[in-house]
Image (spheres, rainbow, N blue to C red):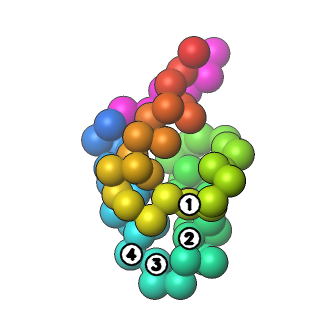
Amino acid sequence: MAKRMSKTLAAEIAERVLKVVNPANRAMALSEALRRHGFGSATLPEGGVPGDKAALVAWLVGAYAGD
């Protein structure tokens, strides 16, 4: 069974990731935050890590819906 991500945790992770100034390093920050919270890596959207907090939260919740 896959681990499910709450909206609160997704918002917390999104805030941390978007604080990274260089967009090229956000994928690495996202990967580290997911690992720290016990989630496996996910395939990023084609455009990379969304630059908008709401979009990133929605993607995280969708990617880790827990099936």
- Separation of disc 3 and disc 1 at Cα? 11 Å
Q: Between label 1 and label 4, give the one nearer the viewer.
A: 1
Quarter of the image with the C terminus in it: top right
Q: Residues within 10 Å of mark 1 (few under 14, many from 20)?
A: many
**Could you tell me the amino acid type at mark 1?**
Val
Residue located beneath label 3 in the image: 20
Is 16 in the magenta?
no
Q: Position of residue 39 (x, y in %)?
A: 59, 41
Quarter where residue 12 is shown: bottom left
Q: Quadrant of residue 8?
A: top left
The reply to whether the C-beta atoms of the residues labelled 1 and 2 are less than 8 Å apart is yes
Three-letter amino acid code at disc 3? Val
Q: CA distance from mark 1 to mark 4?
A: 12 Å
Q: Residue furthest bottom?
A: 22
> What is the x, y in percent for residue 45?
63, 50
Q: Identify the element where label 1 is drawn.
A: loop
Name the residue located 63 percent from the left edge and 78 percent from the top edge.
24
- Where 6 sits versus 35, above or below? above
Around disc 4, counting alpha carbons within 10 Å, would you say few (fewer than 14), some (14 to 19), or many (20 or more)? few
Tags 2 and 3 touching, CB below 8 Å: yes
Q: Secondary structure at mark 3?
A: loop
x and y, in percent, of residue 38 in the image? 57, 42
Q: Which residue is mark 2?
A: 26
| Quarter of the rendering occupied by the N terminus | top right
Q: Could you tell me if the residues under marks 4 and 3 are in contact, i.e. CB atoms within 8 Å?
A: yes
Q: Mark 1 or mark 2: which comes first in sequence? A: 2
